[in-house]
Amino acid sequence: MKTQHKIAIIGAAGFLVAGFVYSHFYLHRKSRKELIEIARELAYTWKRELELDFEQTGKLEDLIIEYTLKKNEIINATALTEDEIIFKLKSIQQAEHAKLQKLMTGKQFQKYLDLNKKISRKS
């Protein structure tokens, strides 16, 4: 194979890889932006329902993003069985509730749990 052919093949491969990397970053940026918008909407819904202050609402938004990413990572793991997924999701929910309990007053957290149960029953 001539040097020119090798350079052409390497150039084409580099171009394809660059396109893949760019599209990967673009899709993740778009997904991240959508996740932030959804988390903001959820946080402000909980703000109204639980009478959260501005600081609590901001921290809640961050927690929603953090735990949504963790839950999605588990759900999308192909090597896990259904039982393992359920076990890991419950574990993450416990950690999430522990952080929420620190963030909210006792009354707010209890109302959060009650509303979540009502939402779960409707689903």
Image (cartoon, rainbow, N blue to C red):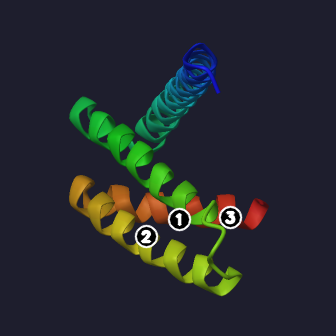
Q: Are marks 1 and 3 in contact (CB under 8 Å)?
A: no
Which residue position is annotated with label 2? 92
Q: Is residue 49 above or below residue 17?
A: below
15 displayed left or right of 95: right
Disc 1 marks which amino acid?
A: Asp
For badge 2, the amino acid type reads Ile
Q: CA distance from mark 2 to mark 1?
A: 19 Å
Q: Residues within 10 Å of mark 1 (few under 14, many from 20)?
A: few
- Label 3's element? helix
Residue shown at 33% from the left, 36% from the top: 57
Distance from Cα at disc 3 to Cα at disc 2: 17 Å
Q: Quadrant of residue 94?
A: bottom left
Disc 3: which residue: 120
Identify the amino acid type marked 3: Ser
**Location of residue 48 by image quarter:** top left
Examine the image and state in which quarter residue 100 appears: bottom left
Q: CA distance from mark 1 to mark 3?
A: 10 Å
Classify the position of the C terminus by image quarter: bottom right
Pinpoint residue 2: horizontal percent, then vertical percent: 61, 20
The residue mark sitting in front, 1 or 3, is 3
Dot 2: element:
helix
Where 110 falls versus 67 (above or below)?
Answer: below
Identify the residue shown where x is 38% and y is 49%. 66
Above or below, comparing residue 113 to residue 35 in the picture: below
**Residue 72 image offset from top left, x and y in percent:** 56, 55
Per the image, the residue denoted by label 1 is: 114
- Earlier sequence position, callout 2 versus callout 1: 2
The nearer-to-camera label among 3 and 2 is 2
Name the residue: 52% across, 37% down: 42
Q: Earlier in the sequence, mark 1 or mark 3?
A: 1
